[in-house]
Image: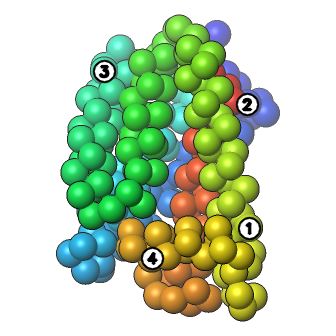
Amino acid sequence: MPLSPFSAPAVCAWLLVLLCAASGTYCLLRARRAERRARGAAGGEAVMGLGMAVMAVPLGTGPWGPPLLLAVFCAASVHALWLLRDGVHHAHHLVGSLAMAYMALTIGGGPEHGHGRAGLPLVTGALLVYYAGYVLLGGARLVTAGGGALPAAAGSAAKAGAATGGGGGAGSGVDDLTRACRLAMGTGMLAMLLIM
């Protein structure tokens, strides 16, 4: 039975689609402006954001959707592996791509966008813990970015963010917007994992 377009789950799903699409589009535009070293990371984030938007659409993806999404996110995983040559700070891209490939395996593709198979509890639980930590750290980093000295953990994460194409120094508008997009996508991943 299809979801009513005005039901709470449908409204939440469309808000998630809008959030992920906006974040993905921003990352795509950032990739076009970025220097060569940062372009790959920004492109990977754009694929993640736009892919998450497609995956969150509550109308279903049809029978072609899950295999296509799986192929896209497997390719994104290979790209993320390639990015690791520039440093371990790109490991988040690999985790995200593999998580999206994992979720693509569980999509049922029905009109209510339900899941055909349940995910593996251990894998889903580990991803939930990872993304909960990522969202909490990202939120703390965003709040403290303009407030002077960062805690040691947030400071190293901020350096990693700058290395992946985060933009200017802490407190710059571009850097804060990049952090906000990453936080939005992390929150979207957490929401999608919670409904598995």
From the viewer's side, name the closer residue of 147 and 87.
Answer: 87
Which callout, 2 or 3, points at the residue further toward the start of the chain?
A: 2
| Residue designated by label 3 | 67
CA neighbours of label 1 inside 10 A, class few (<14), some (14 to 19), many (20+): some
Q: Residue at x 51, y 89 (%)?
A: 169
What's the CA distance linking mark 1 and mark 4? 16 Å
What's the CA distance linking mark 3 and mark 1? 36 Å
Query: Amino acid type of disc 3?
Result: Pro
What's the CA distance linking mark 2 and mark 3? 25 Å
Asked which secondary structure carries label 1, the reply is helix
| Label of residue 9 in the image | 2
Task: Look at the image and tell me whether residue 2 can be seen.
Answer: no
Front: mark 2 or 1: 1
CA neighbours of label 3 inside 10 A, class few (<14), some (14 to 19), many (20+): some
Report the side of 82 relative to 95 (left or right).
left
Instruction: Name which quarter of the figure residue 61 lies in.
Output: top left
Q: Residue at x 60, y 25 (%)?
A: 124
Report the side of 101 relative to 12 (left or right).
left
Which callout, 3 or 4, points at the residue further toward the start of the chain?
A: 3
Asked which secondary structure carries label 2, the reply is helix
Image: 109 above or below 133: above
**Could you tell me residue 167's position as x and y percent?**
44, 81
Task: Look at the image and tell me whether residue 153 can be seen.
Answer: yes
| Residue designated by label 4 | 162
Instruction: Name which quarter of the figure residue 73 lies in.
Output: top left
Report the side of 13 relative to 23 (left or right).
right
CA neighbours of label 2 inside 10 A, class few (<14), some (14 to 19), many (20+): some
| Residue designated by label 1 | 140
Quadrant containing the C terminus is top right
Which callout, 2 or 1, points at the residue further toward the start of the chain?
A: 2
